[in-house]
Amino acid sequence: MLHVKDSLFQNFKFGAFTFLVFYSVIHSCRGESQVIGSSNPIVAQVGEGIILPCHLDPALNALDMTLEWVRPDLDPRFVFVWRDGVELKSKKHPSYQGRTSMFPDELEKGNISLKLSKVKISDEGKYRCFIPGLKKESYVQLVVGK
């Protein structure tokens, strides 16, 4: 038997296997999720609403995380910022005002996809889905047709 000397587990004895499994579970919950976008371009027509896919794998509750969708070629670059459970509209590029949203009910399941409505030709480009707290990112390419 392995005796754990940590104050949280004082006076508890774990078998070596149990302790290793517990240790692995703790370490897998420390931000080991990857941010997954789409390897294929997302194609939209002008005026359509589309979803730029992005999720955490394995899924983590992202509701209280800071989430950023940016277009690196814009200034300001922010398309959508989610912090402390709300959207920060003051950071958003003016051309995206009133056209972007997320799915708050899905954030708990690790879905951090961005909904973009009334697509414009100028929306075409490379979008970065980023979680600063995890230092993880993914890119999604949007192609817009007329």
Image (cartoon, grey):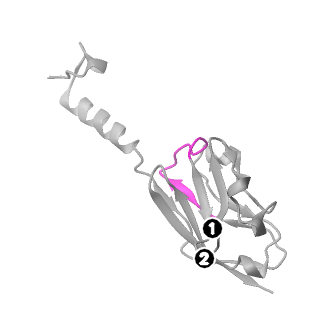
Q: Could you tell me how many numbered marks the image carries?
A: 2
Residue at 68% from the left image edge and 57% from the top image edge: 91
Say whether marks 2 and 1 touch (CB < 8 Å). yes
At label 2, the amino acid type is Asp
Residue at 25% from the left image edge and 30% from the top image edge: 19
Q: Which mark identifies residue 77? A: 1
Q: Which mark identifies residue 125? A: none
Check disc 2 and report its element: helix, strand or loop.
loop
At label 1, the amino acid type is Arg
Which residue is situated farthest in the top direction here?
11
User: Label 1 crowding class (10 Å Cα cut-off): few <14, some 14-19, many 20+?
Assistant: some
Q: Position of residue 136 (x, y in %)?
A: 46, 58
Q: Position of residue 79 (x, y in %)?
A: 68, 64
Q: Position of residue 56 (x, y in %)?
A: 52, 54
Quote the CA–CA distance across marks 2 and 1: 7 Å
Looking at the image, residue 96 lies above or below residue 145: above
Q: Residue 122 appears in which quarter of the rendering? A: bottom right
Q: Which residues are magenta?
A: 53-65
Residue at 24% from the left image edge and 36% from the top image edge: 20
- Image quadrant holding the N terminus, namely top left
- Image quadrant holding the C terminus, namely bottom right
Q: Position of residue 92 (x, y in %)?
A: 70, 60
Check disc 1 and report its element: helix, strand or loop.
loop
Looking at the image, residue 63 lies above or below residue 97: above
Q: Is residue 61 magenta?
A: yes
Q: Which mark identifies residue 73? A: 2
